[in-house]
Image: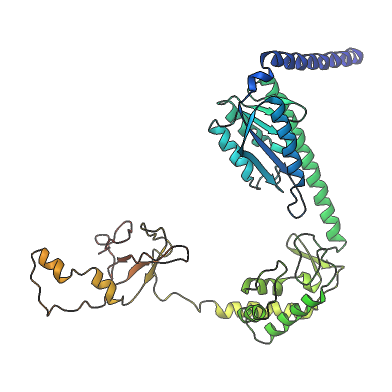
Amino acid sequence: MDPVNEISQVTSDSARLRKLARMTETQKARRRGRTDWTGEPAAIYCRISHVNDDDQTGVDRQERICRDIAERLGVTVSHDMIYVDNNRSAWQRNRKRTGWDELLEAARSGRVRHILTYHPDRLMRQPRDLEELLQIADDHNITLHGEANQRDLADPDDRFFLRIEVAHACRSSDDTSRRLKDALIERAQDGKPHTGKRRYGYDKSGTAIIEAEAKIVREIFLRYLNGDSTTALAVDLNRRQERTALGLEWNTYNVETILRSRHVAGIRVFRGEEIGQGDWPAIIDRGMWDEAQERMSYRAAASRGRFVPKHPYILRGLVICKGCGNRMGGSGGKTCATASAATTPSAATARRAGHHSNSSSPTPRSSSSKSWTCRATKARPRCRQRIRLPSRPTAKNFPNSATCGTSGS
């Protein structure tokens, strides 16, 4: 085909598509006026990807715009139909969005007729999220309203345009992710620290030392190398009312995090590998850090196997109390006489059953068989149920499932 004719054909096709889009919008406007939506239920969805300190300014502005749209359309938005995902990415596949999930559930149940959002990319930046919403729209007539346009999710043309918008948003996020990764690689090659949560001993930038916290870091390393345990260090720091970088109390995990931190030794790490020395000041020298790592490995190897369970329970962590839902813990050896007495009929019970009883009845003795006892938690009181298991379980006398208050023998 001649190049001139080819260009002419492309221009004609584009004009035809634009004309088709205008005709579709006109037909929809005639078919569905504003009065058709008066009083219909609607939901508002607001989202912003990155904010500082959970600032709600972005989503609050989106909600005000969506409320103006609802008032203009005449739809009804109840107080429980406002879904917000603040500081949540719609592009990351492994990021959970509570507001989005609740909105989809409301749409599945038929409680939503209209979805109001600032822009479709606030709702979705992944094609699979759009297809999930379109699948719900196949069963429920749902219209998506934005600040500048509206999309009927049951209309093939609107579905086509919406797929293009979401694909474009996904491509934009892919480009942003690529640029950020390139910037991280450059920062790592230049020896600059990785940004994120504030590290103990440094400010938010990770380059300036906070001397009061650096003093605690040096104390942790020195005392640990002198023989103190991480538990003893945590207890002493809490007694002195020292707090972590997040303002929390110290525990064994926090102390071990300080001891394993390469940042306090000025070591630059990228994707789990050391790539050289960082350009920030170190709190401790590399030799002391290496010695602490060797000491931690030695202590871990020495303590390995020290706390071996005395009794091997084949159902450890699997037996659940049906009375209260708590896990049941095994107890080997002798059990208390009270628990044994609970399974022994009293004299009055024996008389009612037609059995003879006298005062010389033997006192219930403690049993040597193993048992499972319902464990208590602070939230739930102990239901004190016990499952008695035989000393040598077999297929005949061992129950397939454990239930509180029933005997396993």
Q: Residue at x 72, y 84 (%)?
A: 222
Residue occupying the far bottom of the picture: 226
Q: Residue at x 59, y 24 (%)?
A: 141
Residue 174 location in percent, x, y?
77, 42
Relative horizontal placement of residue 52, taking residue 109 as reference (left or right): right
In the figure, 141 relative to 393: above or below? above
Relative horizontal placement of residue 327, taking residue 370 as reference (left or right): right
Q: Is residue 311 visible?
A: yes
Q: Residue at x 68, y 71 (%)?
A: 257
In the figure, 230 relative to 271: above or below? below
Q: Residue at x 36, y 56 (%)?
A: 322
In the figure, 262 relative to 326: above or below? below
**What's the image's color scheme?**
rainbow
Relative horizontal placement of residue 154, taking residue 195 as reference (left or right): left
Residue 348 location in percent, x, y?
14, 68
Residue 191 location in percent, x, y?
86, 64
Q: Is residue 125 visible?
A: no
> For residue 59, which quarter of the picture?
top right
In the figure, 383 relative to 14: above or below? below
Quarter occupied by the C terminus: bottom left
> For residue 199, which quarter of the picture?
bottom right
Total marks in image: 0
Quarter occupied by the N terminus: top right
Q: Which of the pair 393/5 is nearer the observer?
A: 393
Residue 173 location in percent, x, y?
77, 41
Q: Which of the pair 39/104 is nearer the observer?
A: 39
